[in-house]
Image (cartoon, grey):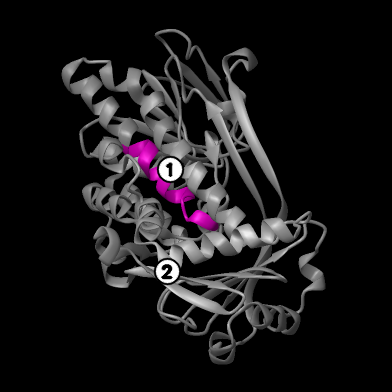
Amino acid sequence: MRTQVVIVGAGPAGLLLGRLLENHGVETVILERRSADYVLGRVRAGVLEQKTVELLERAGVSHRLHEEGLVHDGVELSFDGERHRIDFRALVGRTVTVYGQTEVTHDLMDARAASGAATFYEAENVSLHGFDGASPKVRYVKDGVGHEIACDFIAGCDGFHGVSRASVPAGALQTFERVYPFGWLGLMVEKPPVSDELIYANHERGFALCSMRSRHRSRYYVQVSLDERVEDWSDDRFWDELRRRLDAETAERISTGPSMEKSIAPLRSFVAEPMRFGRLFLAGDAAHIVPPTGAKGLNLAAGDVGLLADALVEFYAERSAAGIDAYSAHALARVWAAERFSWWMTSLLHRLPDMDGFTRRIQRAEFDQLRSSEAAARAMAESYTGAFGAESVMR
């Protein structure tokens, strides 16, 4: 079998890249080691930057997003019960849209199925070959039968634990990592959100977040230590702890109920450099991870594949390698800006295990600066809504 681009991974990054290339007549095959149901069953947040929404529009998969997505003009920050709103629209003229990553994946899956483009789920033993030369190949096993696909390029969109980054020779890759000594315990409930916008709370007991998936479904988080177990957290214990970390008005208004889903997610910052190795490109979580505090994960993945799609379309349309040669440097500039912001948000809002009085007062001073300085608030709004280099990446 032969195609132009093999995409490894059928998460939102791989599916979006496939859709953008398909719209320009570039042939792709997507390989995914999990089943379609498994991919759709992964619960992920979805706070979309304006540029990500525009990219989904360009891909032709934004109809349901615009019907069901919740446009937010800002977020609220709370420090020991004092709340302050950051108004994105007033400060930088941009918004974000809450629309779950699962829904984005669903829309992209439906579009690919309708077009008939080749996608192989439950593809086992995927291996990448020859990407350091002019004739890459991808091998895999499906239903016990081995297959090989010859291609021009390979796009590794298969996540942090995928085969793509692991296939790069160790000496060609440099990695940077910070593992945070805490996680987020998240609970989903079929109740209306307590607020029209997200509330990020810094409390002496730890971080908390009030988020949502829709007008009728809410998602709440509390910071926990890494040795905590989900089984030890009853719904009642979770609700009690969440209320303790919020301001009194918000705590009083929360509509509680039985959890639909409950899980603990560790926090990590990670970057692999470069993001191109011959004819293999890394995108999304295969190349970088951010803590969820800054709502950047899905947006970074979209930025990567938007840039990569443009580069590959340019290559096929104009026989120019300029875009693919610049891909890694351009993508990493935005990645590191998002890493900085996500690290800053995490440091601002969480209770650190070794925190002393000085660090706590630094957090307070940061919060007070966001309240008193329009320039500081504008800088946060720019980063949260994705202003750092987004225009050059997702043109």
SS label for mark 2 = strand
Q: Nearer the viewer, residue 371 or 232?
A: 371
Decide which of tag 1 and tag 2 comes sooner along the chain. 2
Residue under circle 1?
Answer: 301
- Which mark, by number, is residue 75? 2
Magenta-span inclusion, residue 298:
yes
SS label for mark 1 = helix
Q: Nearer the viewer, residue 86 or 311?
A: 86
Q: Is 249 left or right of 268, judged from the image as shown? A: left
Can residue 271 be seen from the camera position used here?
A: yes
Q: Quadrant of the N terminus?
A: top left
Count residues near mark 2 (Cα–Cα under 10 Å), then give few for <14, some for 14-19, many for 20+: some
Q: Which residues are magenta?
A: 293-306
Image coordinates of residue 124 in percent, x first then y, are 60, 34
Q: Nearer the viewer, residue 5 or 54?
A: 54
Circles 1 and 2: CB atoms closer than 8 Å: no
Instruction: Single out the residue that lies furthest toward the left.
Output: 318
At 56% across and 61% down in the image, what residue appears? 365
Q: Does residue 381 lie above or below 191 as drawn?
A: above
Q: Does residue 336 lie above or below 356 as drawn?
A: above
The kind of residue on which mark 2 rests is Val
The kind of residue on which mark 1 rests is Ala
Real-space CA distance between mark 1 and mark 2, rounded to the nearest whole angstrom: 22 Å
Q: Quadrant of the C terminus?
A: top left
Magenta-span inclusion, residue 113:
no
Residue 224 lies in what quarter of the image? bottom right
Depth check, mark 1 against mark 2: the one in front is: 2
At 64% across and 35% down in the image, what residue appears? 177
Q: Does residue 83 lie above or below 115 as drawn?
A: below
Q: Nearer the viewer, residue 316 or 236?
A: 236
At 24% across and 60% down in the image, what residue appears? 93
